[in-house]
Image (spheres, rainbow, N blue to C red):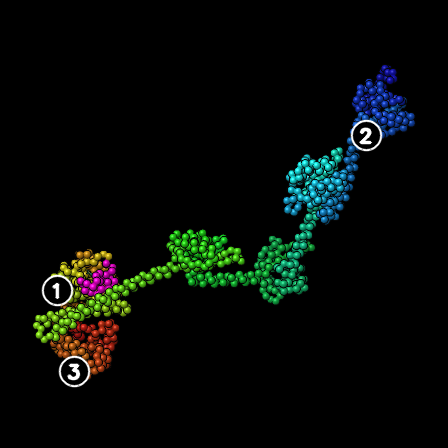
Amino acid sequence: MPAKDTSPREKRRQLILDDFMNSVSEALVIYDHDLNFIEVNEVARKQIGLPRSKILGMNMRDLIPGVEKTKRYKKYMEVIRSGTAFEEEVQDHPFAPGRYILIRAFKIEDGLGITTTDITSSKLALATEQQLKKDLEFLKDSATALIEMSNEDELFQYTADTLREICGGCSTIVNIRDRSNKNILVRAHSLSKEQFRIARSHLGNRILGMSFPTYKNEKLLKSGKLVHLKDGLYDISSGKIPKAVCSSIEKLTGIKALYTLGFTREEVLFGNVLIFETDENRSLNSSLIKAFIRQVSIAIERIRTERALHESETRYNIAFATSPDAVNVNRLSDGMYVDINEGFTKITGYTREEIIGYTSLEKDIWVRPEDRQFLAKTLLNKGFVRNMETEFRMKNGDILVGLMSAHLYKHDGVDHIISITRDITSRKRAEEELRISEERYRVVARQTGQIVYDYDIESGRISWVGAIEEVLGYTQEEFAGVNIDEWEKMVHPDDVKAAVDNLQKAIDEKSPYDMEYRLQHKDGSYVDIEEHGLCIPDRGGERYRMLGSLADITQRNKYQESLKLAWEKARESDRLKTAFLANISHEIRTPMNAILGFSDLLMNPNISTANRADYIDMINKSSHNLLNIINDIIDFSMIETGQMQLYTGEFMPLNMMKELHATFRQQLELLGKEHLDLKLDIPAADDKLILVSDEERIRQVMTNLIGNAIKYTDSGEIRIGYRIGPQSQNRSKIEFFVADTGIGIPPENRELIFERFRQLDDSNTRRYGGNGLGLSISTEIASLLGGEISLESEVGKGSVFYFTIQDIPVSAEDTGKTEEESEKVGYPWEDKRVLVAEDVISNYHLIESMLDCTGISIDWARNGEEVLKLYHEGTKYDLILMDIRMPVLNGYEATAKLRKSDSKIPIIALSANAMQSEIDMSIEKGCNDHISKPISQQVLLETMDKYL
Ligand code: ADP
């Protein structure tokens, strides 16, 4: 160590040196020519790590260890000797292990100066730059290689191999997801021969194509980071391979660590790579790996897109070529055909040559050219047209209905239309035919009053057509939604079970079915329905439908019901007719027996005058009875055959009632019922009335009612009369009545007695005579006259029968006939002469005796010819009574002949036939009037009086 100069100058020099040394950022050491430390700056001191005082007493060789010591000594001594400085980069300098140090040695006056600079950071920066350059170079190459690849397998193998290279020889595996995205398959690897052998012995022959379950941690793989799999092989096998096997493979193959990285593009994970690290000390160039894998991901996507494009192009080409529909490409501006497929040629009949290069207008393809304008306009607005129905003209001129869809697209910058057209001509025709046929059966169904349905069993839907509104009141629209459940709700609750069971049975047995049930009408009422149906297979027997019809049979049922009633009635009336016949024969026999019996007795010349008078009286009564019966039978038959006619005229009901009163008074005497009081009850206010109706028929009804009253009354009184209601417009109500105090009629029989042949007592031992026709005939007559018969009665007390005509015309005119006038006292015809034409002598004598009281002169003609003869002989007759049935010349013929020469002489026809037709005939032949046989004296006199 040199002696210290302590002079001020020296001190200053020392201070400047110190400042200098410490201002240097590098470590600075100064040695003497023996390499003893002379000076160190603070940086160097820190590097050496000893106090300065200690260092300054040391030699370089004391501090540098081992071989380095000698090497360095030699180098430094050479600098001192030669004076040539040198620089040296040293790694792992004893004072700076792991760092790069730049040592500069230079000679100074009597020694050596050394500077050491830590150049680690600049050194490293350089290395990184170089690595980056290398990496870039590499990525450039790999990008070029990847771009050229078009085959996935080639790509995956390249990836495995290249990755192995990047990772400094690590084994690699490429896994790719299959199309289903469910499995991950090993598609390539770069295992060493030894590793492959070991893996195969554990995992089986096929390593490539081996499948793993889908990723456990997709998120991590998608992040694009290099992931260190902590559990190694066991981690990727997802527990499929036992942990022990995994670790054994790892041990055998020398695997120390396992890394993975995913192939991703826009969040889609295609697969991953696995890197097996066998060298613990190596660190992977993760940024290069990541960049490369990104490149591979892009390449995978590109290859796949290209493949998909290719496939779709192929598919399109196949579709274009093979489609049975017409596909054509046209220029938008003028419709020129650019391309067509075979379907087009088949459908239109044009060949390629005939159509390509021509416009659709030139070929006159569009039946309605405005359709093309519409198409072009829509395409320009929307870019596409779907299912446009239009008509095209084919080569042979036929019209085709097409369903067209079209798209607009640019080809070489020019707008084109690609369109596909389906020939729906036959479908349209079929639809039209179906529509017509449906319409036809809808009309038929409607016309025949039927509802026709088609029921799809599976869906429960029903379509209905026909007379829905007529039968059920709903419109077609209202009824359209009615399905099987709703139908069920409409069925009458009492019928629903049977109806549903029937339907189910038909479905189960696939059989036809018929049923009747009630269905609710829209207005709430129920309609009787008759249903016929058929269960038929649909869609090739896959399922079943039901076709059927409903008909409204309410009317038919009602009709059937009334038929049944009529039938029962007919049977009943048959029974009654039989009873009637029995009665009638009894009724006829009784008076006949009396007539015959008493007539026989009269033959005896020895009977007394008193007896004779009695017998004649009996014969007379019995004859009247018989006549009544015959009249009833005639009336009945006229009613039955609808021949009963009315003869309307004016009459005074008061007079009619007075006559009836008088007649029945007489009858009471004849019947020995004088004790009965027959009263005429007509209020004074009603006695002037004149009715317009058929007097005779009203009289007939009243006669019947009064006759019955007498018949069924033993004591007390019988009151007859009428009451008039208020008049309005010359019409009024009249109510005739017959009230008795007889046996009465029990309530349950009050309707029955008006029926034909009905007698309350129809036994053989009847107490009261009669044929059971009277009331039914009266009822019919009453109804013909516009009236009705009703009754009030109490058993044991009596009955009141009312004969009411509600709206009977009344005459405003008074006929002027007075009671006195109409009540004739006698017939003084002594100055008159009558000719009686009658072939039966007894009849002639009867007439003769009936006219005896009038003093009239009588001539007798036995037939028509005699009438003519007598008449023409010049005798003047005032009247002729003309029997109709006569030999030689009958009454009609005689009358007709007479009328030719004399239109004035009154002729009154006498006929046994009481039929109205007979009466009409006699009037027609020229007779003035008609009297039915047997002739009553009163009628005879009254009738003759009209003409004399
Ligand atoms: P008939 O010829 O038997 O009298 P009708 O048709 O006139 O036939 O009457 C039917 C039945 O009505 C009679 O058999 C009788 O039982 C009952 N009848 C009619 N009128 C009377 C009456 N005034 N009083 C009681 N019963 C009567």
* Residue 689 picture quarter: bottom left
Question: Disc 2 versus disc 1: distance between alpha carbons?
Answer: 177 Å
Q: Which residue shows up at 22% across the image and 81% down it?
A: 889
Indicate the secondary structure of the residue bearing disc 1. Answer: loop
Residue to which mark 2 is pinned: 91
Q: Which residue shows up at 49% across the image and 61% down it?
A: 438
Residue 712 placed where, x, y %? 17, 61
Residue to which mark 3 is pinned: 875
User: Would you say 141 lies left or right of 577 here?
Assistant: right
In the image, what residue type sits under mark 2? Gln
The vertical placement of 87 against 467, above or below, is above
Would you say residue 785 is visible in this rendering?
no
Residue 629 placed where, x, y %? 20, 68
Q: Kindly report the secondary structure that dominates the magenta region of the rendered protein.
A: loop
Residue 215 placed where, x, y %? 65, 41
In the image, what residue type sits under mark 3? Thr
Indicate the secondary structure of the residue bearing disc 2. Answer: strand
Q: What's drawn in magenta, residue-wise?
A: 749-772
Whether disc 2's CB lies below 8 Å from ligand 1 is answered no
Residue to which mark 1 is pinned: 672
